[in-house]
Image (tube, rainbow, N blue to C red):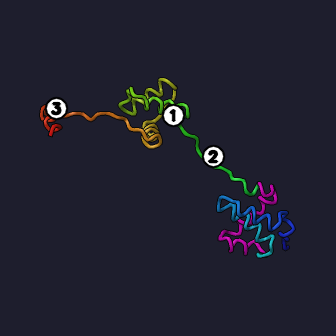
Amino acid sequence: MKVNYQERIEATTTELKIIMAGQQTVTNRQKVQALYLLKSGLSQSITDVAELLGVHKMTVQRWLKQYNDGGLSSLLKRSRSTGRPRVIPSEVIAGISVKISEESCEFKSYKEIAAWVEDNYQVSIKYQTLHKQVRYRMKAKLKVPRRLSSKKDPAAAIEFKKN
């Protein structure tokens, strides 16, 4: 059974051209272009459209099903992947960033930060998770002076700095 897509697609070819020009993403542009190709008669089958757009024919069929079910707005709606939620709540992250940015920041290690979070927010955070959040996402470094050697002569260090 041959499906007449020209009758199924409600928008005109000029409307589809305007909509296609206004799309921000390549995928949405391809979706509208698939409708345009079928409506204008430049392609007679889904297989031809898929070859022209460089996608699989099942992808084009999925797009047409979305269009038939909900129209053009449903087809162009961008769904966002939810993903896994962060382990550290946002108010804890805000509290850590405020505490680290203070002049009198007393944190010398990430374990001290974890203890502070445990005391103030009653949230237990693994060391590795906290380190990744503070060091790489917040781009903060704990300013801890390095240990001095017991063999080092303080007078020699002062003399070295003078020269």
Q: Quadrant of residue 16?
A: bottom right
Q: Measure how far apart labels 1 and 3 are at the Cα level.
A: 38 Å
Query: Is residue 99 in the magenta section?
Result: no
| Vertical side of 19 occupied by 101: above or below | above
- Residue type at tag 2: Thr
Q: Position of residue 17 (x, y in %)?
A: 75, 66
- How busy is the neighbourhood of tag 1: few (under 14 within 10 Å), some, or many (20 plus)? some
| Lateral position of residue 73 relative to residue 113, left or right | right
Which residue does the numbered mark 1 point to in the structure image? 93
| Lateral position of residue 102 relative to residue 7, left or right | left
| Lateral position of residue 81 relative to residue 11, left or right | left
Tell me where the magenta segment starts and ends, as one range.
44-73
Q: Quadrant of residue 148?
A: top left
Could you tell me which quadrant the N terminus lies in?
A: bottom right
- Residue type at tag 1: Ile
- How busy is the neighbourhood of tag 2: few (under 14 within 10 Å), some, or many (20 plus)? few
Q: Nearer the viewer, residue 1 or 96?
A: 96
Judged from the image, the secondary structure of the residue bearing numbered disc 1 is: helix
- How busy is the neighbourhood of tag 3: few (under 14 within 10 Å), some, or many (20 plus)? few
Which residue does the numbered mark 3 point to in the structure image? 150
| Vertical side of 45 occupied by 161: above or below | above
Could you tell me which quadrant the C terminus lies in?
A: top left
Q: Measure how far apart labels 2 and 1 are at the Cα level.
A: 20 Å
Which residue does the numbered mark 2 point to in the structure image? 82
Query: Is residue 53 in the magenta section?
Result: yes
Q: Nearer the viewer, residue 120 or 145?
A: 145
Question: Between disc 1 and disc 3, whose residue precedes?
Answer: 1
| Lateral position of residue 26 relative to residue 122, left or right | right
Q: Measure how far apart labels 3 and 2 are at the Cα level.
A: 54 Å
Question: Between disc 2 and disc 1, whose residue precedes?
Answer: 2
- Residue type at tag 3: Ser
| Vertical side of 140 occupied by 105: above or below | above
